[in-house]
Image (cartoon, coloured by chain):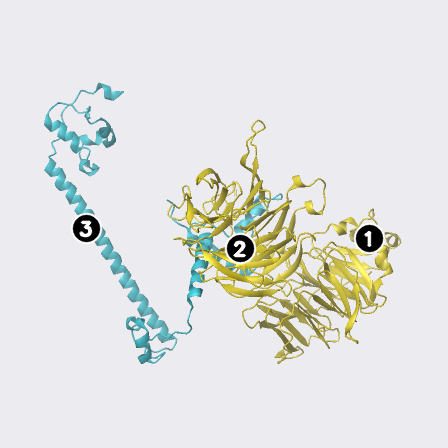
Amino acid sequence: NKKALLPPPPLNSSARSRICIQILPMEIYHGNASSKKVNCAKITKEFQLHLDSSDDDGPEEVTFEDSKTSALRSMKEALETTKREKELLKEKRRKRQELFQKQKVGQLNKLGFSKNVKLHKKKKTNISNPFCSRLKGNYSVMRVATQSATKSQQQTAMDFIQSRLYGPGSQRTTTNQLLSLQNKRGQNKSAAVQFVNEKWAKAEQMTKRWIHKQKVPSN
Amino acid sequence: MGEFKVHRVRFFEYMPTAIRAMSFNAHTERLALARVDGSVEVFNFADRYFQEKVIPGKDAHSIEALCWVGGRLFSAGLHGEITEYDLENLRPKYSLEAYGGPIWTIISNPQGTHVIGCEDGTVKLFEVLAEGVQFERNLDRQKGRIISLSWHPSGTRIAAGMMDMIRVFDVLTGHAIQRLLVDRSVGGCKSRETVVWTVVFLSDHTIFSSDSAGKVQVWDGHTGTLVKTHQLTKWDVLALSVSKDESSVVAGTSEGTVVQFQFIAPNLQQQEKEWVRTRTFKNHTHDVRALVEIGTAIVSGGMDTQLVVRPLLEKFEEKCFASGLRRIHFPHRNLVSCAQKARLLLLQFPGQLELWRLGESDGHGKPGDILPLKTKPEKLLYLKRKGKDHICCSALSSCGGWLAYSTVSSVRLYRLQTDNNISITKVPKLPKVLRSAHQLCFSSESSYLFAASSQSSVLFGCSCLGENDCEVHVYNLQKLELHCMVPMYSSCPSAMGIHPTTNNLTMVHADQQIFEFSIAEKQYTVWSRKLQMQGLHNLWLNRDTPVTHVTFNPKNPDQILLHDMYMFCIIDQSLPLPDQKTQFYNQMTLRSLSEQERPSHLHAFKVCKSFQDLMCMRLLDDQSLVVVERPLMAINSQLPAPVRQKKFAT
């Protein structure tokens, strides 16, 4: 064991404090030549006994204040980068939303709806509907049918089962895959199945796309 | 014997629905099955797994669980109601709102009186009374949804499977006395909660649980500790069932496998028994959602829509009908009506009816040739049903001028015009008495419509007959009274027909026996007695699927035409009956023989297996045959997504 040959550390206070500092975050060591040979883990186990010995000279002097300021600085920088990223994302999202709104209006105009079409008497909806204020232009919201509480509960329950069996993480495949596997592993091995029927082929494509969307990033 | 032009129809896009729940009544030997569309079917396991009853479903009324209490059948679903079924009239008797949100499971007390409905957080006890079901009380409310329940055989404890845990309740006090924590999946997604899909409570207080992490766990119900974990699969284990003697537990997985655990001594030296994983059955391609272990077999069903009965071979001493693997794909009744004169087909779906005109061909050819079509088959009409109830039966008159269908709440009759312009007009104001029909049938001249309500079916010939629970009654139409009753036979008739000229009633039963009864003489015919004396050939008797339709050839009174899912057969009564040593499927052999040799090899049963997965076979007035096929491959290609299994070298 190499470490047994190492000379014991000089018993002066500065050396001891140096060892303590070296247990702090690794960033402090970036760019420090001699420190590259130092392994943080090793030090945490053996800090009382040994120092890195490949140099005969002692390691460079790094004062407590210096390392403290650099640590604080790096933390600040990290915080600032995350803030900036958030801002950028927000900006992106806002721009996208605006684009969609523009496109929507464009579509409606194409279809012949002018911005001034009233779907319902403005007076009524303003009182009963809190969403009115959020709509741009002269659109208004009209309730077509009342959905009872039971129906929504039923829908939630159905969504729960659907998401557990077929939702993200369910690792499903298409029926085409299943049939192809049967062909390939059967008694008389043959090629993968290809649907000639247009409807089935389309359904197959849709299922593949949906499965791709379901894939959860692995832990 | 003759050649037939065959209209080979494959445009009936019949899609069965997935099986969601099953419940076996050991006393009456009936299996009740619920499908995802809300329909309920009852199979008679004492009579060749014959599908005796079908109760159609309803929109937005799916079923999550079924249970028998004595001879009464109850179901519950996400719509929050408990429904009892009228098994005589084949409709829901009543529905009781449980006021607890969606119901995930319903189970009955071994003592036979309590029925539990279970919803978002509460376990509710209901008392089963003679006239209905009555709310008794709630057990302590829990914070999560309750997915599964199991009674302890003594009726004092209930185990409830929830999210990430199992709770054991004391029924008397209503408090939760144990909490068993279920681990989340190993590796994989740790942030997803584990759903305990099923729990089973045994009499020695052992609890079996199956969950969405693919585990089956064995717990000690007294101490609340985990005894053993079996990791079966990385997908969900959706179903569990315990045998009556509690020596075997079976689990159904999303991969389509059924795994058996048995309570046996693991090796010869040891005297102590424990739960050991023994066999694995792979009979399904998709998720197994319903499972029942009945004495001698394991019955499973799931997303691949077929009902599989897998016998446990160690329970059989010799090979018999019950020791073979059975798959039930198609319903044991007709979904296709045919207008023989007008050459029209009426296809019945749960939500609509489709009327098609068959194509025509002028060509001639040798047997096996495909003739070119002059006109293609044409869809004339798409009739969507009114209301939420699914269609239970339909009929088309022979001339093609009348169409009728029935749901559990109404019967509708329409006048049809199909010559040049297609038109359909509803016949208003049908008699109030006719609220719903279990079977509809038009008379041959289209002058009468017969509607059978309650558990009976009706046929028309020169007389009319009704069948009720294996009893066949013959009625005289002129006098409108009962003419006679056919002697009782132990097996249910699966198909019947009245000969147009001889007025003989031909009946084929679920056990494949054939009888011919003379209505005029009120006794079995000579031919029928001869057939019974000789006995039917073994290959005929061992067929898997029942005969669903019997019809006759107006040009040849000796012929009886019938079909099941895998063959159609023309019985020629003028030919000798085959004995056990005769080659039964002899059509190919006959073709290779010379004209002189043939007569000595002929026998009465001419079976044709060229057309498979038959839903219907009829003889049209112009002597051509119509066969409606629904290839199982077509059904399998449109099933929902199965789990993804990586296999080496594929």
The answer to whether one can see residue B603 in this image is no
> Is residue B556 toward the left or the right of residue B324 in the image?
right
Element at label 2:
strand
| Residues flagged by tags 3 and 1 on a common chain | no
**Type of residue at label 2?**
His
For disc 3, the chain is: A
Mark 1 secondary-structure assignment:
helix
User: Residue sitting at 73 percent across and 49 percent down?
Assistant: B542
What residue lies at 15% left-to-right and 43% top-to-bottom? A72
Dot 2: few (<14), some (14–19), or many (≥20) neighbours within 10 Å? many
Q: CA distance from mark 3 to mark 2?
A: 64 Å
Residue A4 position in % (x across, y down): 23, 19
Q: Mark 3 highlights which residue?
A: A80
Please give the letter of the chain rendered in cyan. A
Residue denoted by label 2: B114
Residue B476 position in % (x across, y down):
79, 72
